Image (spheres, rainbow, N blue to C red):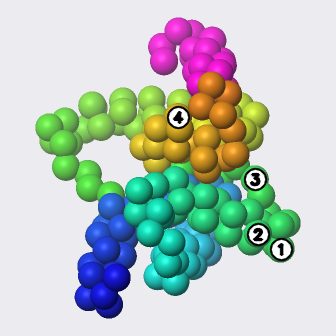
């Protein structure tokens, strides 16, 4: 691949995945700046990657590299815990409900309640929920990232959602 094509490809990957990877890394390290370093390392590794097969499975590859780097950092710093939700400056806030403060407060409270319930789930269930709903990955892609079968991902996600429904009184 020529340098210009490679640069354009990496830039497109960054535009598509950087925010999702940053949120994902924050759940491991609890520190936005450290998460940015992890995501930067992930994209640096992408720049050095020569395997053309990476293009066909870019999302799972990036999440797996990010996950492995975050776990390495956590082991080094002995910091792996569930982090609160981080609001990233890059996330847009425009919506049809943004002009109604009551609706915005209700959405914020509901999201906080869901995240509190998610934080009570086992680590593996939390991670699968984040990869599915924050990362936008398919079951197959989550399986690639976590080293699980597609059916195992489905069972774990189904169990997690069932537990969330029970905790929230059937509201999920």
Please name whichever residue, 58 or 82, is drawn nearer the observer in this view of the structure: 58
Say whether residue 167 is left or right of residue 59. Answer: right
Q: Quadrant of residue 90?
A: bottom left
Q: Which residue is drawn at 60% across and 19% down?
A: 158
**Residue 80 in picture, x, y percent from top left:** 77, 58
Mark 2 and mark 4: Cα distance apart in space? 24 Å
User: Counting other residues with Cα less than 10 Å from the Cα at mark 4, is it few (<14), some (14-19), or many (20 or more)?
Assistant: many
User: Label 1's element?
Assistant: helix
Among the two numbered marks 3 and 4 on one chain, the one whose residue lies closer to the N terminus? 3
**Residue 33 in picture, x, y percent from top left:** 56, 76
Q: Is residue 163 magenta?
A: yes
**Which stretch appears magenta?**
154-172
User: Label 4's element?
Assistant: helix
Looking at the rendered image, the disc whose residue lies closer to the viewer, 2 or 4, is 4
Q: Contact, CB < 8 Å: mark 2 with mark 1?
A: yes
Among the two numbered marks 3 and 2 on one chain, the one whose residue lies closer to the N terminus? 2
**Residue 29 in picture, x, y percent from top left:** 68, 64
Please name the predominant secondary structure of the magenta segment in the image: helix
**Residue 76 in picture, x, y percent from top left:** 83, 73
Q: Mark 1 points at which residue?
A: 76
Return the mark for residue 81: 3
Q: Residue at x 48, y 13 (%)?
A: 171
Among the two numbered marks 2 and 4 on one chain, the one whose residue lies closer to the N terminus? 2
Mark 3 and mark 4: Cα distance apart in space? 24 Å
Q: Residue at x 32, y 90 (%)?
A: 3
Q: Which residue is drawn at 18% across and 42% down?
A: 95
Please name whichever residue, 40 or 78, is drawn nearer the observer in this view of the structure: 40
Q: Mark 2 points at which residue?
A: 72
């Amino acid at each position: 691949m020529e340098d210009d094509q490679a640069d354009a490809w990496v830039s497109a990957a960054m535009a598509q995945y950087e925010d999702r990877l940053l949120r994902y890394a924050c759940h491991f390290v609890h520190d936005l700046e450290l998460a940015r370093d992890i995501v930067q390392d992930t994209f640096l590794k992408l720049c050095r990657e020569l395997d053309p097969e990476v293009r066909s499975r870019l999302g799972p590859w990036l999440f797996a590299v990010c996950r492995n780097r975050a776990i390495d950092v956590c082991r080094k710093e002995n910091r792996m815990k569930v982090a609160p939700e981080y609001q990233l400056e890059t996330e847009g806030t425009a919506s049809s409900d943004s002009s109604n403060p009551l609706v915005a407060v209700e959405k914020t409270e509901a999201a906080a309640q869901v995240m509190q319930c998610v934080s009570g789930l086992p680590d593996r269930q939390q991670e699968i929920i984040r990869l599915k709903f924050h990362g936008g990955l398919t079951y197959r892609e989550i399986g690639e990232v976590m080293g699980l079968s597609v059916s195992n991902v489905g069972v774990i996600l189904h169990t997690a959602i069932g537990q969330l429904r029970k905790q929230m009184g059937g509201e999920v």
